[in-house]
Each structure stands twice: as C-alpha cells, then as structure tokens.
Image (spheres, helix red, strand yellow):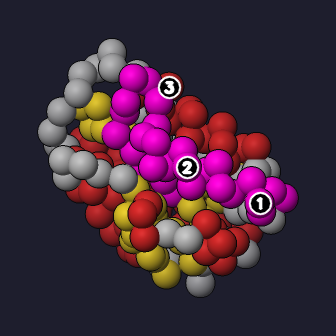
Amino acid sequence: MAKVLVVYYSRGGTTKQMADAVAEGARDAGAEVDLKKVEDVDVQELIEYDGIIAGSPTYYGHMCAELKKLFDESVRFHGRLEGKVGGAFTSAGNIGGGNETTVMGILQAMLIHGMIIQGSPGGDHYGPVAVGEVDGRAVGLCRELGARVARLAQTLA
C-alpha cells in the first residue's frame, strides 16, 4: 500500500477543502493517507512517503511562504525524495491570479528533488485550481489528483 502525504496551507479554508478532496481521492485509490497542515510537518517526514501532494493559496503568483519554507528546508534531504510521486494544487481569487505559476512553482521544487510528476490530459493539466469557491469541478479534479498520485505511487513501490 502506498503512503501519501497531503500537505497544505490554508488561511481562509479554501485550500483545506481542496486538500480534503485530494486526500479522499488518494484513500479511495487504496493509499494510506496523512493529511497535514504544513506547520505540522517536520521536513524529515517527507522521506517516509511514497507520494507527496502539496497545496497552497496563490499569493502574487507563488506558493505561500509556509510551504516554500518546507521546500527550502528539504534541501537537507536532496536526493532522498528521488522517485517519489508528487502533485500540486492551489486556490486563487480569480482566473488570472497566477494560479498556474503557483502550481508550477510547487512542481519545480519537486522536480529538483527528482520526484515524478504525472500530468492530467483532462481538466487542469498541471494540478487542480479552485477560483473563488471550491465548486464541484474543483472537488472532482482534486479527488482525481489524489487517485492518480496514489495509483502511480503504488505502481512504483
């Protein structure tokens, strides 16, 4: 059974709603899932997981400082996350608010670690985005992200 971490930061609750849906999708796909606020994750824990899915609100087209700090601290374990499966999601205030650059920034940090990223041929190709409210579309894409990461992590484990 693949072990997946869904780590997120949420100030207003939107990104947390997305994280809940991502975790549900991963569980439904058979993974053991830990759902944690970024402030509750010790960077050393990252090496214990087969898959890591990170979520952040979009702030000026970038991930939040709290999640960036986790990735900055993860440099200590450079090379030890290689081959793990990664994914990302974000919430934004509007369509042109930098949501895609936020997801790509998270994925870039994962790729630098040598993690494996699987895109989506449908929906939001790089990772789910909620604009304003978390609607049914966003929930479905979040569940699918969790399931895709869980299935790939299980295949590679």
Residue depicted at 18% across the width and 47% down the height? 12
Amino acid residing under circle 3: Thr
Q: Which residue appears farthest toward the right when viewing the image? A: 79
Q: Position of 27 compared to 131: left or right?
A: right
Q: Earlier in the sequence, mark 1 or mark 3?
A: 1
Q: Is residue 130 magenta?
A: no
Q: Position of residue 55 (x, y in %)?
A: 42, 49
Q: Which residue is mark 3?
A: 101
Q: Is residue 19 above or below residue 31?
A: above
Q: Quadrant of the C terminus?
A: bottom right
Mark 1, secondary structure of its residue: helix
Q: Position of residue 111 (x, y in %)?
A: 72, 44
Q: Which residue is mark 1?
A: 76
State the CA–CA distance, disc 3 to disc 2: 18 Å
Residue depicted at 59% across the width and 84% down the height? 1
State the CA–CA distance, disc 1 to disc 2: 12 Å
Mark 3, secondary structure of its residue: helix
Q: Is residue 73 magenta?
A: yes
Mark 2, secondary structure of its residue: helix
Q: Dot 2, how many residues are within 10 Å of its Cα: few (below 14), some (14-19), or many (20+)?
A: few
Amino acid residing under circle 2: Lys
* Range shown magenta: 53-79
Q: Position of 26 compared to 20: left or right?
A: right
- Discs 1/3, front: 1
Q: Which residue is mark 2?
A: 69
Q: Position of residue 134 (x, y in %)?
A: 19, 44
Q: Position of 144 compared to 31: left or right?
A: left
Residue depicted at 60% across the width and 41% down the height? 107
Q: Which residue appears farthest toward the top when viewing the image? A: 96
